[in-house]
Image (cartoon, rainbow, N blue to C red):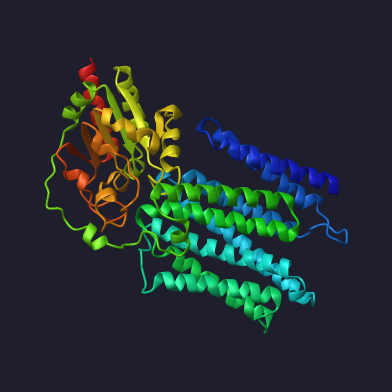
Amino acid sequence: MSGVLSLSYLIGSVSFIVGLKMLSHPDSARRGNLYAALGMTLAIIATIFLYKNSEGLPLGNYGWIFGGIVIGSVLGTLAAKKVQMTAMPQMVSLFNGMGGACAAIISIVEFKHLIHTGANIADQPIFTATILLGLVIGTVSFTGSMIAFGKLNGNIRDKIIPMQQIINVGLLVLILIFVVGMALGFIGGDPMTMMTVLLILSTLYGILFVMPIGGADMPVVISLLNSFTGIAAAFGGFIYDNNVMLTGGILVGSAGTVLTVLMCNAMNRSLVNVIVGAMGGNKGGAAASSSSGGSYKEITPSDLAVLMMYSKKVIIVPGYGLAVAQAQHTCHELEKLLSNNDVEVKYAIHPVAGRMPGHMNVLLAEADVSYDKLLEMDEINPEFSQTDVVLVLGANDVVNPAAKNDPASPIYGMPILDVESAAHIIVNKRSMKPGYAGIENELFFQPKTSMLFGDAKDVLGKLISEIKIIAS
């Protein structure tokens, strides 16, 4: 049976790797997710029925185990089916937090078990440090994800406390001292009390780490917290000597870390700034959000239809407003209609557009938009100068020129989509209110920019009707 269990773990690990590889392309992402899920299912079933402890006894407690599986499956299925695409980032944060909580609970249980065996924890420094690190990282992931959930859901506002960075760095140093001191026996006292103190410190850091972060920086935080959960799960695999858990944790942790670094590069931020909580916030927000005093001009769907039909090239910039209106299918219909009338159409995807990494890619893939038409920032930026019309659908901060020319802006230094290089810029928004970063966008007041107010789905529907009239 142990051989069959090991084989099951091997198959599960391979399915994770294959599934992750397939997630890199929209055409295979759904199957990749399914393969990884099947591998996890195999590993869980094999563990429940084939695992035996050192005394040769099975797991037992099948009622609790299957009760938890049934409840979790029902809740997960309902959430996945009912959640709107606009709420997907919140759900990702929530589910990621649950993973971190599980890793932290594993560490608490195993630390208690280690103490109850009567062993001196200083005699097993590596094992003890692994348990404590799993506790710290899992707790930070859980509390940070819950704060991120509240911020994305609009329940929690950004809050910066005095000396925020110093406090965060101080907490990190204190946590490290506790982990090393407990593992090596430098810190005395009751082990359970020391573990409780470590748990409290980790909880505080998780809260203070995410609390000041806001605006366009949130996708980076979600990615980083996801990597934290993976690392915590990998520590759990090491504790239990479970290869499939270790493999899964390493893949999630490493993939999340790589994605975080890429997102940081896209935001022109350093990973160190993320960890100490120095990102985003409202630094310079007062100066950046002051009224420009400029005026804007509007355009009607009928005028835009004429402009688009006489264009050679149109670039669509999707943003969170597109997701809120659930207009991805209507947008794809517009794209096909223009393409059928010999207008070249492409989509410009900023790495942090939306509320989580890949948000716009997932949204447009749901509408069956061809992957070849989705171009990342570095690919599409050189094309704006040869573009007749840019249609910005609900995006704000990722096209804000303040990132390039306003040092007082909280997004200053962030690479943006160079939409202002196009001949005509059309911006669809519900109103002139600032975007997620809370700052005004000077692009809206430039001579080449026209505002198209209204719900993205309704506006695009009217635009499609006007184009059909012209085409006929």
Q: Nearer the viewer, residue 378 or 27?
A: 378
Q: Position of residue 304 (x, y in %)?
A: 19, 29
Towards the viewer: 60 or 103: 103
Residue drawn at (74%, 71%) of the image: 113
Q: In screen coordinates, is 424 left or right of 90?
A: left
Q: Is residue 64 above or below residue 266?
A: below
Which residue shows up at 65% across the image and 42% down it? 16
Q: Is residue 380 above or below residue 437?
A: above
Q: Among all residues in the image, which is located at the extreme top?
A: 472
Q: Is residue 117 left or right of residue 408?
A: right
Residue 376, position in %: x, y?
41, 36
Q: Is residue 80 above or below residue 365?
A: below
Closest to the observer, 110 or 329: 110
**What percent of the width, then of the height, locates residue 100?**
58, 60
Query: Image point 63% across, 80% down: which residue?
Result: 193
Quadrant location of the C terminus in the rendered image? top left
**Residue sitting at 64 percent across and 73 percent down?**
180
Q: Is residue 251 left or right of residue 155?
A: right
Q: Quadrant of residue 313?
A: top left
